[in-house]
Amino acid sequence: MLARSIALLYRHLMEEWFDVAKRIETSALAAAQQAGLDTEAFSADVRPADPRFGDMQVNGALPYAKRLKTNPREIAQKLVAALESDDAVSTVADLSIAGPGFINFRFKPEFFLNWLNAFSSEDAFRKSASRLYACERVVVDYGSPNTAKQMHVGHIRSIVIGEAICRLLEYCGAEVTRDNHIGDWGTPYGKLFYAYKVHLDAEALKNDPLGELERLYKLGSNLANEDESVLEECRQELVQLQAGETESIALWKRVNELSIQGLTEVYDQLDVTYDYYLGESFYRDQVAAVYRELEDCGLAEESKGALVVFHPEHKRYAEQPFIIRKSDGASNYATTDLATMLYRHEHFKATRVIVVTDDRQKDHFEQLDLTTAKWFEKTGRKRPIFNHVMFGKINGDDGKPIKSRSGDPIRLKALINEAVERAYAIVKEKNPDFPEDELENIAQTVGVSSIKYADLSTNRTSDYIFSWDKLLAFEGNTAPYLLYAASRIQSIFRKIDPTELTDLESKASPFETDEEMTLARKILEFVGALQVTIETLRPHMLSTYLYELSGAFSGFYNANKVIVEDPGQKARRIILCQRTLLALEAGLSLLGIKTLKRM
RNA sequence: GGGGUAGUAGCUCAGUUGGAUAGAGCACCUGAUUUCUAAUCCGGCGGUCGGGGGUUCGAAUCCCUCCUACCCUACCA
């Protein structure tokens, strides 16, 4: 009973330490005030420290002293004196000053144990993290393939990065809408419809809808190139569709259904589910309102026959127009994107809109954002925050965009299948005695995860080189390495009698070994890693952390046996295993990656 | 011409927005396995952070300039 009350008290006191950096910042700011510093000019500048010096460091004394032209070391000494008189700080950490005025915090070993005891479940993590993005309603626009075509490698980054961002935002308390802005309208349909009517292979359509539709489009396109009369028929098909003729619309709907069905097969494999497929066609009757509003509020003007928006205050967009209606009178994607922005504001009440596309579209989305800002301001609407989450190319070994042997883009479906096959071969070799269905399940998880993780572990704004050997390796920053670490922990728990897992907190003795301390320290960094990932919308920040966590665990695992005689030692090591698994599984699941019980 | 993104070890990549002696993995050299999964771990080798200037206590990071690659730059998305 007493032990329980103490545990509860600890939990309460520890609550504010969930975000260690933030808690230290609070104390540092209070200390600055107490020490008589100009608090306007002082910022704490808290960051993880090099382990040789401490666990966390406060660097704010240096820029402060610079600004006020005083001695940084003296400032640091004043701050430390004030911090040391703060019981909340001095009971958990030892402070020291180093170099020109770095303030180092080294946590006491029992602090790590207390922290791990206070945040001992997925719920505790989630609850503390869910404040970060509470009250946000975010529409995330990602994937966005064209219909009637198979997806290829070029689509993977948007899907994988977009899904990770959705999960991260949800974890941090946001209400997320997943919207697939498919390209389901436009000129290719004339050629497709012509070929569909003349050359359809019904059997193929049933077995592989996207493959057959794509074949038909290419066929129609080729035939139209060769034969002027075919080209004319294609034009007529398009005219009929755009005129909204019943038969054409029916066929168009049929094509879309089949397309989405085909797309969903791949999304299922990647564990991605959309809330909406509001593609370009959805907005086609909303473009007139866009023209009217932008003209009415004086943003749009005629130029060379087109309706465009210039931004005179911008060095480049003063000259480079945002074309919202082409000179032939047709809309383009600027138009539908503006209509989309309006819809997401009005219908979804979005506080934030995130679009995940490749970096070539940077200019377009900058113009879209500038235009929306002015448009919404003039019409008295509250504009959602807009983030264009962009990414670079996937290259082959030669550093050029990755292609199949035939020179065509590699199909996403084929890429995933190859990953699963390769993973199967490896898993089978390592575990020949696993049952067949488990082998297949492991191969599926390892294969898909490896492809996803290869993408998520590199900075999205850079290009990266795709290499089977690298992404399926068990060394380095790869999915198999992380999954292996997780499954080793699972393996330990299979060897432990479940009755031994009770009251670990009261049985555990303080951490002693270097490996224990390193691992414990790393687990605490989960919070900071999550924050920086969310702030920058860069999933690789979380990947890097998870890799380091796995490394810290592997080092611990090799040096410190968990199942030992000493009850205190055993309990604290079990706690480390549990919390490592917790952070690892939470982190991987935020990246859209499933873990395995064994592999 | 204007703008953007990038250039870090032989290769593939990090580097928390100006902090301490620039870090990982691969490769190469070494050591650890009667073991809770060695699909692992410990150690070593490896750097003019594209070049040059500048800003300051302090620069891979900020400013200027040049070089290289890719992308955008009026009606594709």
Image (cartoon, coloured by chain):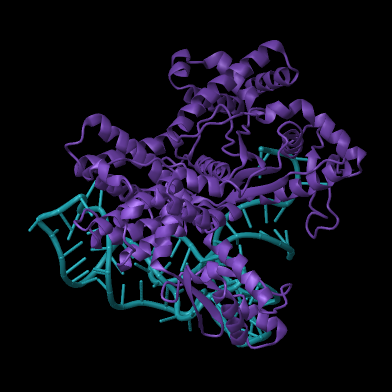
In cyan, which chain? B
Residue A96 in the image: x percent, y percent?
Answer: 49, 80
Quarter of the image where one finds residue A226: top right
Q: Percent x, y for residue A255? A: 58, 20
Residue positioned 29% across, 33% down in the render: A440
Q: Nearer the viewer, residue A89 or A302?
A: A89
> Above or below — where is B5 with respect to A487?
below
**Residue at 51% in and 72% down:** A90
Asked if one can make out residue A44 in the rendered structure from this viewpoint, the answer is no
A91 above or below A533?
Answer: below
Q: Is residue A564 left or right of residue A30?
A: left
Q: Residue A585: x, y in percent?
A: 41, 45
Residue A85 or residue A140, whichever sits in front: A85
Q: Which residue is drawn at the image coordinates 83% and 40% (left, top)? A: A381
Q: Is residue A334 visible?
A: yes
User: Drawn colour of chain A?
Assistant: purple
What is the quadrant of the C terminus of chain A in the image? top left
Q: Residue at x 50, y 57 (%)?
A: A14
Q: Is residue A353 left or right of residue A498?
A: right
